[in-house]
Amino acid sequence: MSTEQAKAELMRPWSTMPDGGRNMIRRIEEEATEKAKDKARRVISMAIQRIASEHVVESTVSVVDCRPTK
């Protein structure tokens, strides 16, 4: 396929595209959406873990018994 043919193929309206092409585009879009959602979940969970650990460090109190032992 030449460059001109490829450009013409990409410019064709969605309705005239063969079913295989529409299905392929739809599948690629769905995969991209799923990958984006997974990545967003990972980023959010990492952010929550970092904030939670900082919060625990700031709000945790250590108690040390200084009384002499008998």
Image (cartoon, rainbow, N blue to C red):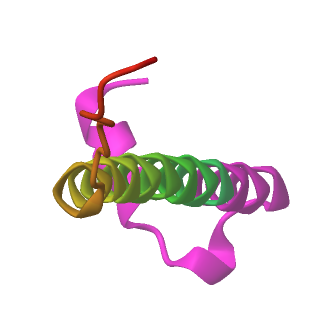
Q: Position of residue 46 (x, y in %)?
A: 37, 46
The residue sitting at 44% across, 24% down in the picture is 1
Residue 62 is situated, as x and y percent measured from the top left of the image, at 29, 44
Q: Residue at x 50, y 78 (%)?
A: 13
Magenta segment boundaries in residue numbering? 1-29
Residue drawn where x is 25% and y is 40% of the image? 4
Residue nearest the viewer, comparing 7 with 60:
60
Which residue, as the protein is rendered here, is positioned at the far front?
A: 70
Instruction: Using the image as rendered, state which of residue 46 and residue 31 is in the foreground.
Output: 46
* Residue 70 magenta-highlighted: no
Magenta span includes 21 = yes
> Which residue is at a point 54% across and 59% down the rendered structure image?
37
- Above or below residue 11? Residue 62 is above
- Number of numbered labels in the structure image: 0
- Please tell me in which quadrant of the rendered image residue 16 appears: bottom right
- 50 in relation to 12, above or below: above
Q: Is residue 38 left or right of residue 23?
A: left
Q: Position of residue 57 (x, y in %)?
A: 23, 48
Q: What secondary structure characterizes most of the magenta part?
A: helix
Q: Quadrant of residue 23?
A: bottom right
Residue placed most toward the observer, 50 or 1: 50
- Horizontally, is 34 left or right of 7 in the view? right
